[in-house]
Image (cartoon, rainbow, N blue to C red):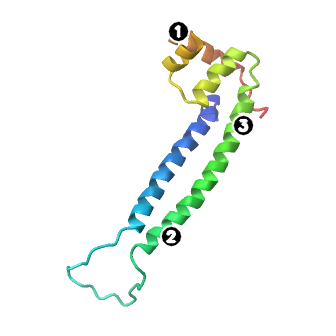
Amino acid sequence: MDKKTYLCRYHNILEKIEKKKQYIDFCNERASSIPGPCYGERINNPSPSYEAPFVRWIYKGIEAEEELEELEKKAGLVRMEIEKAINTVKDEDLQMILTYRYIDWLTWSEIAAKVYYSDKTVRRKHDQAIELIKIDQV
């Protein structure tokens, strides 16, 4: 795994967490709705389910909430690993740029505005920081 991919892991987990939250909201919405009657052709099912249709959405929502808890724990651990890796860079300005980029997930122009550098300088310093970072010591 290259250094940038390693540092992007936290953001990727946060995106998964956001998607999981949306899925939980969807499941809760489905679980709280009552389906209307079906007037279509009736199919003889040899083993009909006597469970209400919304019950499966309740179960799916519970499973998704458990997965969400695991993702949130993982996100905390990954964030600590990335912060530890960023701290292997001795220059505080470079640490700040890496933190803004990979923890706060700011754009280059937002980082430039915060550290009072041009976009080009921020990218150059970012590349320097990537060269200095040591992910094998984490």
Residue denoted by label 2 = 59
The Cα atoms of the two marked residues, 2 and 1, are separated by 51 Å
Secondary structure under tag 3 reads helix
Residue farthest right in this picture: 137
Q: Which mark is residue 118?
A: 1
Q: Is residue 136 visible?
A: yes
Q: Give the mark, 2 or 1, whose residue is nearer the N terminus.
A: 2
Q: Position of residue 102 (x, y in %)?
A: 60, 29
Secondary structure under tag 1 reads loop
Residue at image coords 65%, 29%:
3
The Cα atoms of the two marked residues, 2 and 3, are separated by 33 Å
Q: Is residue 94 left or right of residue 119?
A: right
Mark 1 surroundings within 10 Å by alpha-carbon count, few (fewer than 14), some (14 through 19), many (20 or more) = some
Judge depth for marks 2 and 3 and give the one in front: 2
Q: Position of residue 107 (x, y in %)?
A: 50, 23
Secondary structure under tag 2 reads helix
Residue denoted by label 3 = 81
